[in-house]
Amino acid sequence: MRRNDTIMPIRWRELLPEFPSAGAWVNGERTKAQLTGRPTLVHFWAASCETCRAGLPLVNEWHRKYGGPDGLGLQTVGVHLPRTAEDEDAAATAEIIARYAISHPVLLDGDRAAAAAFRNECVPAYYAFDRAGRLRHYQAGDRGLGLLEQRIQKLLLTKEPE
């Protein structure tokens, strides 16, 4: 595929897209309207992705540390983006969610509508949005998760949109 044919994810400062998928939600549904007003981390992952599974404990930790009852208000939304036929099995994905004790909302994006709205083709992929719902950090893969956490901390401490 030529570089010009590659779909580029949403760009810096673009607004948080809607979650248009008809897929099921685990741990509660979230809408753009519910998320706007507080910093938000959207995490795309797949059960068949070893790198994704390795990162799930860290996403859980951030959800508890920065978004829990004693946290600073981070909202976390997972989007399970199937990559294989096995990933299409909602019961198997729910089992992974239970095994990793994921407590934040997860959209099962079987129709890939949420991935299309974010123009996302990668797993794992991380999108950090500010209080106004504007993208402030994007990264794909497992490198630079420390930088992502620093960006989340900055978004949580910034009261006004940047």
Image: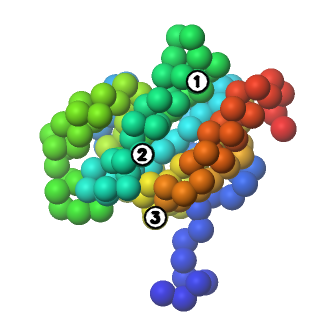
Residue located 80% across and 24% down the image: 159
Helix, strand, or loop for circle 2? helix
Q: CA distance from mark 2 to mark 1?
A: 16 Å
Query: Which mark identifies residue 121?
Result: 3
Residue 81 spot, x, y in % from top left: 35, 53
Q: At label 2, which amino acid type do we have?
A: Gly
Residue located 43% across and 31% down the image: 60
Instruction: Left or right? Give the position of 144 relative to 31.
Output: right
Residue ranking furthest to the top: 69
Q: CA distance from mark 1 to mark 3?
A: 27 Å
Residue 135 spot, x, y in % from top left: 68, 47
- Front tag of 2 and 3: 2
Q: Residue tagged by mark 1? A: 66
Q: At label 3, which amino acid type do we have?
A: Glu
- Front tag of 1 and 3: 1
Instruction: Left or right? Give the position of 156 relative to 65.
Output: right
Residue located 61% across and 45% down the image: 146
Mark before the other along the chain sequence, 2 or 3: 2
| C-beta proximity under 8 Å, tags 1 and 3 | no
Q: Residues within 10 Å of mark 1 (few under 14, many from 20)?
A: many
Mark before the other along the chain sequence, 1 or 3: 1
Residue placed most toward the observer, 20 or 11 = 11
Q: Is residue 117 visible?
A: no
